[in-house]
Amino acid sequence: MFILRKPTGKASQQTVNKRTFYSLILSLSLAGALPLLSSADEGMYLFSNPPLRQVKERYGIDLSQQWLDHAMHAAVRFNNGGSGGFISPDGLVITNHHIADEFLAKLSTPDNDLIANGFLAKDRSQELKAPGLELNCLQNIEDVTELVNNGIAEGDSFAEANKKRSANIEKIEREASQKSGLRCDVVTLYQGGQYHLYKYKKYTDVRLVWAPEQDAAFFGGDADNFEYPRTSLDAAMFRVYENGKPLNSQNYFKISPEGTSENEAVFVIGHPGRTNRLETLAQVEYTRDRILPYRLARCRTMEAAYLQFAERSAENARRANNNIRSVANTRKASTGMFQGLCSKEIMERKAAQEKSLRDRVSDQTPWQTIASAYQDFDTNYDACMLLENADAFPSPLFSMARHIVRLAQEREDKKYHLKEYAPNKLESLKLRLFADSPMYADVEKTALNAGFSFLAERLGPDSPDAALVLQGKTPLDRAAELVDNCTLFDPAVRRRVAEMSLADLEKYQDPMIRLALTVDARSRELRKVFEDQLSAPSTAAYAQISRERFAIEKDSVPPDATFTLRMSYGKVKGYQNDGREEPWRTTIGDMFTRAAEHKNIAPYNLPQSWQKAENRLNKDLPIVFVATSDTIGGNSGSPVINKDGLMVGLNFDRNQFGMVRNFVYDEQKARHISVSAPAIVEALEKIYGADSLVKEIRR
Amino acid sequence: MFILRKPTGKASQQTVNKRTFYSLILSLSLAGALPLLSSADEGMYLFSNPPLRQVKERYGIDLSQQWLDHAMHAAVRFNNGGSGGFISPDGLVITNHHIADEFLAKLSTPDNDLIANGFLAKDRSQELKAPGLELNCLQNIEDVTELVNNGIAEGDSFAEANKKRSANIEKIEREASQKSGLRCDVVTLYQGGQYHLYKYKKYTDVRLVWAPEQDAAFFGGDADNFEYPRTSLDAAMFRVYENGKPLNSQNYFKISPEGTSENEAVFVIGHPGRTNRLETLAQVEYTRDRILPYRLARCRTMEAAYLQFAERSAENARRANNNIRSVANTRKASTGMFQGLCSKEIMERKAAQEKSLRDRVSDQTPWQTIASAYQDFDTNYDACMLLENADAFPSPLFSMARHIVRLAQEREDKKYHLKEYAPNKLESLKLRLFADSPMYADVEKTALNAGFSFLAERLGPDSPDAALVLQGKTPLDRAAELVDNCTLFDPAVRRRVAEMSLADLEKYQDPMIRLALTVDARSRELRKVFEDQLSAPSTAAYAQISRERFAIEKDSVPPDATFTLRMSYGKVKGYQNDGREEPWRTTIGDMFTRAAEHKNIAPYNLPQSWQKAENRLNKDLPIVFVATSDTIGGNSGSPVINKDGLMVGLNFDRNQFGMVRNFVYDEQKARHISVSAPAIVEALEKIYGADSLVKEIRR
């Protein structure tokens, strides 16, 4: 599947902290070296610099400003790592089931597992508020590059320049937010080549409307994930409320009754998370040799632990289901990336791209700066990921404890200024921190035991960093004592503790708060090493490379993805693989055929609702289709629209050949995979009996 | 479960090669420092030095020489890594289902999965020959320490001394084997403190008689593995044939009709694989900081790959079932060991033991030698495990290719003398090499892809060692081309190719043979580094420590386990855990209760045969019991007998508290877990209708 999630893949409480730091450490990317884009359908374009020429040349289509504005305002970002879009004037939003599943899990009980059973609100009063979910809708884009670099002098050290930039960014965001009342984020494009100010409408009253059973949404399970041909209905719907009423969403995507057809031009409107195409070869090699092996080892550690826990009972399986899917997804995606980077052919292509730019540039320093920065930082990589990125603490209980401690520090001491606690970020952070999501002691013990074991395996249990955390105990015992005595399960307690002074926190009897306090100094030290040794010099070097590249290519090459709104274009098209002709689409009938072939055994089992409706369904209707457009994780739930702005599908995955898209785009076999929009309507009508929803959509 | 298997856990073809080298690299242990054994039931004793005094003191029992001789001759070693015992005069042998499962898998077809369905030979003509299975029955033990050290001079370097010892051992084994016609192995005890010559009767015509369904044998699955309370029937039976007729096995264990009872003294007669109790602290720390993290990372890599493969269809699951169980078992056992070694308390106990010996010894050199040897070898550890220990090649196809190449080298060039190809080893090796076991291209591709990826993750795909193997291809592509074009699936081809000269092998068109040839020089180089830098100095140092320790303690402390026959003693006893009183036994009724609690959902599902027989069964009969006796992996299938020599149980596991037994013994909570023998007879009679077997056993 297709989602921007961190290896940790745990509940939303982590996301605020995690995304901020994680994006630093892993998407430090940008402007490396790339000749002009090939003639292929490559590129995730900014709405402020759309590919009008390319679309006209390749598809003969003129995209109007009106078409673009409409698409931008109808698109929605899911802040847990996905995309979506409005599909009715009453605030109805569609996204993938695997973006919704986190909230389905939170809204489930031992008696009603919404992931297993699905959900349909009988009427609007039955819609369920998703705890901690925030949606963003982009309103405006502004270039603020000069403001961000304001006051930086020639002789400034990397660290000084970085500090000034951070202060400028914080100021721009704060002032813009005060003035507009909107969520305002400065987005780093071309890793410092450009900075844009994105203003969003922010929605936090978001309610679950409909989700199919996981057996339908994730038909084929982990086995089919990142594979094609594929049959599944990876979709779910929410409704946005404002002041207690459904949002009046004037811009929304109408669903095309006919869907798409072979060779049609389509446009993906969504929020790709991260690509690495403009990274230097040295950085890509570091990703291959260090980051991906680390991440794979960590995913497999968590996956084995969760699976063992899940095997003990059906209720355990329900509780851990979301964690398992998330970590398996990251493991599979990372495997694909690593496989790709093991290919000499791909690495030679990267090398040739880099050479072609470097040959045209006289100053080779920035490339050397980046290579040295990674070398310098390397000895701290594991410790930094484990402590400051909290990989050793894969529990929302720890994330919450850390937020509580750092919020107090931020209130009391200016020297503790971390960007994720900037005033304009606090509201979103608290939304997640105080959300009433169920947590289970046994799941959190399992997760922390695995995280602690991974910490001890990587650094050695006797190492100062591991000893600080474990305190001479086994991972199992330490996890148990932390969770058994943790008070933070209760949102009311969290609200209260989050108001405490640092002095009171020091005295507060909660081992998780104590752990967050204990590791804080070392954790901040590692972050500073990261910022000074890696982030600051790389940013400066990439900015220089960027300037060199702009001088040659202008901004015809879009920046690497940054989990901000982009558009891609491509066409609906099958491909050849291993002598087989893979079709441009699969049908509802194919889904039944595959279930029968597997004797309806999991993960190829259809829910009863589908079996009962079999005779009523139009089996010839496409359920899934593939297209060449350029996508990546974070694009999950992106509306796929046609030249008339009608929604023909809902992107949810790439095939295995698309898994190196982080690094290179390929048009021959790589495809993104979408649920066909009319199949969603067909299912709503004939399987789920969601008549009023169907009426609302068709209106 | 309780089995001596290597992390690779793949088919038997590997075992011959693997065990030899693996035992070198991981059980280099011995004589570290340990005061006299505590008063607890600790110790896996040699039959040549049985714990007569201890058993008399603790249990008031006099063990006669006749009792000992009978137990020794009725015990059986399963050369795939387990134990067993004769239970009738007609060569009937009992062991664990999880020792038999490798052969159940080999004898299965897509139409009849013996692991899922179980097996019962209607009569002797229906018994199925197990491909490649060799059983050994110990006949005689002789101290050959002086002969082994013969000719080693004071001034010899570590490497020279090692070479002389190896030559002596080879000569002793060869001559004894020629003289006696038996399988003769020199066993290194106290890692060079003593060398004993073990003579075995060897049986290679071993046929499957009975096995229950895996759902009964492995009830509770991976979740219950290494846990207690437990309910399962982990048992299976084979029959030994000699000259086409059932063996006349005069020494056999009669099954006690009453079974055991609380507090009864019991004796475990089996083949514990490896313990590390006498290792120096430096070696234990190396195991904790380097070996176990490596092994865990590898197990998780293989497990994730096999699980993903298995999820694709029921037939895939059948094919990969045995690999999954094996690798999950090693992962879980290694997790337990690692957890234990993270405990400050346990490490301080080890340190105190070492100090108490070192305080009494003037020369501290050997401890320093061992610590330095590990330091020196460390940079080669990964490469050595990956290439020479074949961790990068977890497929029997590669193991076979390597054997074929090395057999040719041994025939043609004396300088290639590797101990696993000594003349007296060849017969057993060829038995496995030419056994007709099914292999599946898709399983082998999955395994090699994972092994290659692990290689690339550990060393980097650009490293010379990984490049030698991958040749610039992705792990996936390289695995596919190797397997798709491999000729070694067919045993007739293997027989033919194994006769070829090296020159012909060089020309032979098989990419797997080519790979074995390509990596051979580097692989041997790593082995030499291992032998010279680690094995030789450690062996010499341990021998010296051993002499010092003998001077103080004599041989009252048994040597670390070496997968040779031992006896342990203990008593049947429950324990307290987390405020709960865990019972000394569970009953057949408990098994039905647990299935009901889990709604008969896997892994807590009873097979239909059990459900049908429910009303006929004596539900009060114990099915599983626990005792304090000292056991470890390799003891799987060990007969548990009472003072009268009657079999009361069949050992199959330890509980989680017994998982640090490699390093320390604990009597308070650590228990070994056995199937109660009368429950096996009850099941044979009332569930499986195996009347003639029951009659044979009761005779």
Image (cartoon, coloured by chain):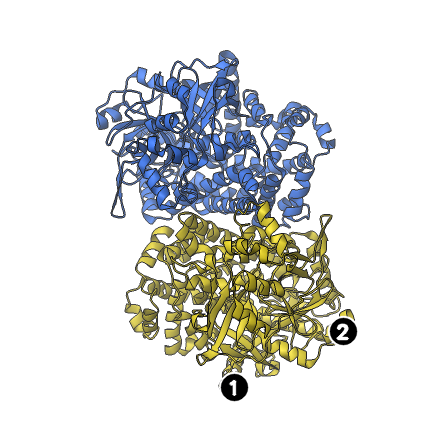
Chain colours: A yellow, B blue
Q: Quadrant of residue A137?
A: bottom right
Let me know if marks 1 and 2 both belong to one chain: yes
Q: Does the rendering let one see residue B430?
A: yes
- Write down the residue under mark 1: A180
Count the marks: 2
Which chain does the numbered disc 1 sit on? Answer: A
Amino acid type of the residue tagged 2 in the rendering:
Lys
- Residues tagged 1 and 2 counted as in contact (Cβ below 8 A): no
Q: Is residue A565 above or below residue B604?
A: below
Q: Is residue A62 above or below residue A121?
A: below
- Write down the residue under mark 2: A56
Residue B69: image location, x then y, percent: 35, 17
Q: Nearer the viewer, residue B629 or B180?
A: B629
Q: Is residue B684 above or below residue A36?
A: above
What residue do we see at 37% from left, 18% from top? B695
Mark 1, secondary structure of its residue: helix
Residue A538: image location, x then y, percent: 59, 68
Q: Quadrant of the N terminus of chain A?
A: bottom right
Q: Nearer the viewer, residue A138 or A522?
A: A138
Q: Which mark is residue B423?
A: none
